[in-house]
Image: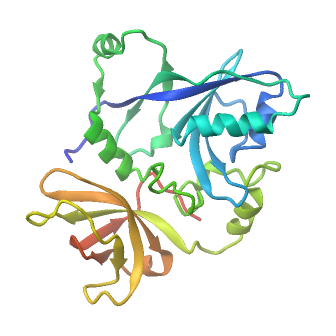
Amino acid sequence: MKSIKNKRNYWLEEFEVLSIKGKDSNRFLNGLTTSNMNLQNEVVQTCWLTPKGVLRAILEIYFYENDITIIALEGDLYEIKKFFEDMIFPTDDISLSDVYKNFRIQEVDENTPWRDGCPKLIKENNIEEYIKKNNFTVFDKLRLKEWKILQALPILNYEIEGTHNPLELGLLDLVDFNKGCYLGQETMARLRKLSSLKQEIRVWRGSISEGNTICKNKKIYLNVIKDIIVGYITSYIFSENLKVIGLAIIKSKYLEEHESFYLEDFGEINMKKSIGSIFL
């Protein structure tokens, strides 16, 4: 991947959007997500969990004067809407819109965590004209995928697949441990008391050998002997210069002394904590 340092690059992507209106909207969202919805921030990134604390979606919530707008940076917004509808009581002053689509844009670079940017939703009929008018350099699909992996942004059906909690996925700062009750809070509170996590997400890099275009065995071993499994690959893509990059879940006890491990399909692979990850 070519360096994006010192260049103004933009993450532009079309997302499915859901709007919420009503005086009980903040309270409602506060009980279903991991962040505090009462801090009067214009944009809040947060997690939606199962009652057992497993990550189901990463949400971005925009607070406007007359409504609240939600996009799922990763997650199924139709599933989220159905769950929200089931949780609304007849006495709640809350109404949900139909799901619609909207473009979101954010300036990004490789030295800044993805959630430190200033995203905004674009209501433009001609997105190409908007890009041209503002002279934006927008990532194509491959570069955007690479950037997301380097940011360790969990992906639906890969890292977000019904097993992992937000803390081991490096999303500690999206969980407010001081606010009131919310879905999955008991598990988050229990994990917070631990001195360390059992496993953590990492970015990995490897080299592609001739004819090797797929990862058949996703188990990661301590070394070439393959007698100790330290983790497994969750996602990967092929980059430039015969390189492969991806995300992996690694047992924390092996990360203390090792930065490289062995993958049957790509040989030695190097592990790195992403700038986009924050752990206990």
Judge from the rendering whether residue 109 lies leftward or rightward of residue 70; answer left or right: left
Residue 25 picture quarter: top right
Colour scheme of the rendered structure: rainbow
Picture quarter with the C terminus: bottom right
* In front of the other: 274 or 241: 241
At x 75%, y 51%, the residue is 183
- Furthest residue toward right: 91
Query: Would residue 37 be visible to someone looking at this image?
Result: no
Judge from the rendering whether residue 195 lies leftward or rightward of residue 103; answer left or right: right
At x 20%, y 51%, the residue is 239
Whole-percent x, y for residue 203 in the image: 36, 60
* In front of the other: 277 or 57: 57
Judge from the rendering whether residue 65 lies leftward or rightward of residue 8; answer left or right: right
- Number of callouts in the render? 0
At x 30%, y 28%, the residue is 138
Query: Would residue 170 be visible to someone looking at this image?
Result: yes
* In front of the other: 17 or 243: 17
* In front of the other: 257 or 146: 146
- Furthest residue toward left: 210
Whole-percent x, y for residue 102 in the image: 49, 21
Instruction: Note whether 221 is above or below 106 in the view shown.
Output: below
Residue 171 picture quarter: bottom right
Residue 52 picture quarter: bottom right
Instruction: Note whether 238 is above or below 222 in the view shown.
Output: above
Whole-percent x, y for residue 275 in the image: 42, 53
At x 40%, y 82%, the residue is 229
Whole-percent x, y for residue 99 in the image: 58, 25
